[in-house]
Amino acid sequence: MDVLFDGLAGAVALLLSGDEESWSIIALTLRISLTATAIALLIGVPLGAVVALTRFPGRRVVLAAANTGMGMPPVVVGLFVTVLLWRSGPLGGLGLLYTPSAMVIAQGAIATPIVVALVAAALQQVDPDFLVQMRALGATPARALAALLGEARLPLLAGAMAAFGAVVSEVGAAQMVGGNLAGQTRVLTTAAVLATSRGEFPLAIAFGLILLLLAFGVNLALTLIQQRRVVPR
Amino acid sequence: MVTAMRKGILLGLAWVATILLAACGTTAPSSGEPAKSLILATTTSTQDSGLLDELLPVFTRESGWQVKTVAVGSGAAIELGRRGEADVLLVHSPAAEEKFVAEGGAGQRRLVMHNDFVLVGPPDDPAKIKGASSTDALKKVADAKAVFVSRGDESGTHSKEKDLWSKAGVTPGGNWYQSTGQGMGETLRVASEKGGYTLSDRATYLAQRDTLELEVLSEGDPGLLNVYHVIEMTTKAGDKVQPDGAKAFADWLVAEPAQRLIGEFGRAKYGQPLFTPDAGADESKLGL
């Protein structure tokens, strides 16, 4: 039990001490996971909208693939991205392996199916007459889509939170494509694993607690946005 | 409607492209970073013991080469070298290394340092191996069917373990022989929790001794030496290999200042050095 209290004390000490290394790990974790989530939203929202609102051959297969992708093990994604980014791989020329960009790519790949599946589910819930009405009222397709997204913002933000939660907490892909390089690609999860394998349990728990705090902060912000206009009548 | 959708898709693509570019911008290396970087594939023991944290910043400062470390088992490190995915290797699996160098993709291979392996186990020592030679100890563990935890990951430590089992004339198997497939730190932890025996390099064991219920029970015989070599890769392994970086790192590692750092490493914290520097020594003295 002592180790848990030591971890708690360690987390507070790390945060208060302004230890440069820990803060850079925290900043990098946020930067990578938020960028990956943003990319996943940018790809996943339009794709999810197309899947939800249009009919095309293979639509259900895409949806099933997205639903499968929600449960894709990060380590499998990490392995694929690693092989693609190897010097001898098809994208080797970019020299991205063991950089934050590689981690953004892997985490983006993990988060995108989650966004697609949740956006598709959310938009299909909106009254199908809604779009027809909007168009009848003279809205351009883009305007109509924007209104539709506004209508579905609760589940959409839930999708964003699910995507962020998935990538900020994964370790398999971050370790494999990032390499856990100190000061370059070390994020909270890989730092916690390294501390564990070094037997530095209080430090590992401290990183774990900071990760929880970080996830809570981001989700709190998103929840506040989500609930902003939901006022009890 | 079709044209509207096409327009929408084009817009969407443009949107994605913009963001991807922006993302690449934010994740590009910061300006203060040295431009040259090389990939070092090495074993978990050099990272888990903390030795690399000590050495690499000095090398980067002196040479301008930034080092990206991939800490995996020696087997995986050699495989990365073979594929041209690493520029230089720091590994401890001499038999596998010699075979690898004979294949022709590698350049110079030089002796760097050694420490030794130790057989550790629970303080009550159910198989009574304390003080026995390594092979006798393993025979006793097998006879007693006491829990033995193996790395099982084709690392240098795992090949040494397999080597010792075959010298002991035992083919380990059964419930008592458990394979973690993980690094040395995790494997020691599993052995400690299960009250089992395991083979560990001394550096990793010493670095974690305080959190483990394990004692050194068999040590010191010549079969237990753990010898590290640095291997430079060449462009024969892959056209993106950087032989100049490999040479810079290997030359630096076997030169006097780095050898002195290696010899001092751990002395303050553990009361004894974790590695013995060996550059330029005669390999036959280490039983190779």
Image (tube, helix red, strand yellow):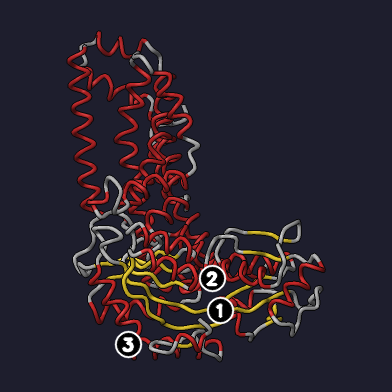
Q: Same chain for the residues at labels 3 and 1, yes or no?
A: yes
Tag 2 residue: A198
Residue holding disc 1? B207
Kindly identify the amino acid type of the residue bearing the numbered disc 1: Ala
Counting from the top left corner in percent of width and height, residue B265 is at 46, 86
Residue A137: percent from the left, percent from the top? Answer: 24, 10
Report helix, strand or loop for mark 1: helix
User: Would you call the spot at circle 2 few (<14 residues within 10 Å), some (14-19), or many (20 or more)?
Assistant: many
How far apart are the alpha carbons under marks 1 and 2? 8 Å
Q: Residue at x 22, y 51 (%)?
A: A93
Looking at the rendered structure, the secondary structure element under dot 2 is loop
Looking at the image, how many numbered discs can be counted on the residues?
A: 3
Q: Nearer the viewer, mark 3 or mark 2?
A: 3
Contact check, label 1 and label 2, Cβ < 8 Å: yes
Q: Amino acid at mark 3?
A: Ala
Q: Position of residue B174 (x, y in %)?
A: 75, 56
Q: What mark, if any, has residue B255 been given in the picture?
A: 3
Q: Is residue A227 left or right of residue B242?
A: right
Q: Are marks 1 and 2 on the same chain?
A: no
**Residue located 47% across and 53% down the image:** A171
Q: Dot 1: few (<14), some (14–19), or many (≥20) neighbours within 10 Å?
A: many
Q: Residue at x 76, y 56 (%)?
A: B175
